Amino acid sequence: MESFRTIVFREDHVEVIDQTKLPSTLHYVMIHDEQEAFTAIRLMQVRGAPAIGMIAAYGLYLGLRKHATKSVDEFFDIVQVQSEWLKSARPTAVNLAWAIDRLTRVAWTQKSSEVPAILAVLRREAVAIQQEDEQACRTMGERLLDFMADGMGILTHCNTGALATSQYGTALAGFYYAHEQGLNIHVFADETRPVLQGARLTAWELQRAGIDVTLICDNMAATVMAQGKIQAVMVGADRIAANGDTANKIGTYQVAILASHFNIPFYVVAPWSTIDAETVSGAAIPIEERPAKEVTEWGGVQIAPSDVNVYNPAFDITPRELITAIITEKGIYKPPYHFS
Ligand code: MRU
């Protein structure tokens, strides 16, 4: 198991690893309210679908504590404004809206209580989201053992590990479990341009756990597959539409096409909170566009002409036809996808 905690709740603030500083520095950011949560999510100090949901939930609760003396009506007006604003921090991962909606729903069930009592319920709910995430990741990890065998090569994209969740991760949870069981698996991690979550985060956490990980550039995936080094692809998800189309980190779609070409199974691993039953297909999933500087600069160094046109979508949609199975804590889903 990994030797760090990504998110630690300390009652008057929440601590989260600053992922922009990895792999060189393990540093925690302190979040005291919704403003600091918004900033940490927007700047990707905290990232990964489940992790941003948890930080948004804690941020909302912590910020609302400042309004304990307001009337119930005033309090609910603030809840409404802050919830909508927090949801806008990053639009693609549905876990963010899911966590905020879960808190606001539970607040409404207490409408006839005093504000301090409502706050107590919000605190409990935010903590429950984190505890449930930990349990869900554990279950997904156990389920993934059925898809792994000794000596297998597995390609992953972006970071779906302990850094992206409360513990263990989604797809990476399977690698932690396989390692614990003594299975000798070889993980290939795409570096994941432009923000390099694979290089900076996945390689860091797997190496730290003693798991055999080999870093490759994104444009090497076809070569390692053609060389017979990959027997499965396992990735996470930011939003899964009702028909199984899956939004995940940009570059996932091309990996899925390659896997199909080489007849390699392609698995999506995500908690139930990533399934968006309201969104019929991938076409309706909003795709975040990120600043051009992520592409034209690295570590403050310019690597492209500063005024060049840049297109920087942060996610893509993998059509359901390319997905062999979707593994959640509730069960394993195969085409045609009906989540219930
Ligand atoms: O932009 P990011 O780094 O937040 O994107 C994250 C991903 O795409 C992950 O693969 C996904 O959230 C799964 S996290 C368990």
Image (cartoon, rainbow, N blue to C red):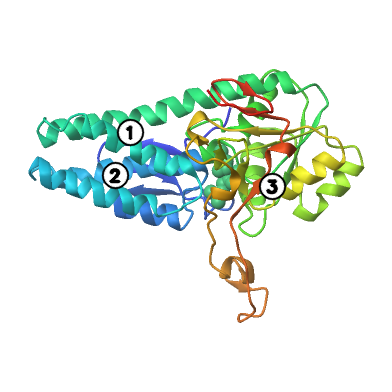
What is the CA distance from the residue labelled 1 to the residue labelled 2? 9 Å
Is residue 261 positioned above or below 81 on the image? Answer: above
Given the image, on which type of amino acid does mark 3 rest? Thr
Q: Residue at x 54, y 48 (%)?
A: 285
Q: Which residue is mark 1?
A: 126
Classify mark 3: helix, strand or loop.
helix
Q: Quadrant of the N terminus?
A: top right
Given the image, on which type of amino acid does mark 2 rest? Leu
Tally of marks? 3
Q: Position of residue 45 (x, y in %)?
A: 47, 53
Residue at mark 3: C-beta within 8 A of ligand 1 = yes
Given the image, on which type of amino acid does mark 1 rest? Ala
Q: Residue at x 61, y 80 (%)?
A: 306
Q: Nearer the viewer, mark 3 or mark 2?
A: 3
Image disc number at residue 252: 3
Quarter-of-image position of residue 128: top left
Q: Quadrant of ligand 1?
A: top right
Residue at mark 1: C-beta within 8 A of ligand 1 = no
Q: Which residue is mark 2?
A: 60
Quarter-of-image position of residue 14: top left
What is the CA distance from the residue labelled 3 to the residue labelled 1? 30 Å
Q: Residue at x 34, y 39 (%)?
A: 101
Q: Position of residue 28 (x, y in %)?
A: 42, 47
Q: Nearer the viewer, mark 3 or mark 1?
A: 3
What is the CA distance from the residue labelled 3 to the residue labelled 2? 31 Å
Is residue 297 positioned above or below 37 on the image? Answer: below
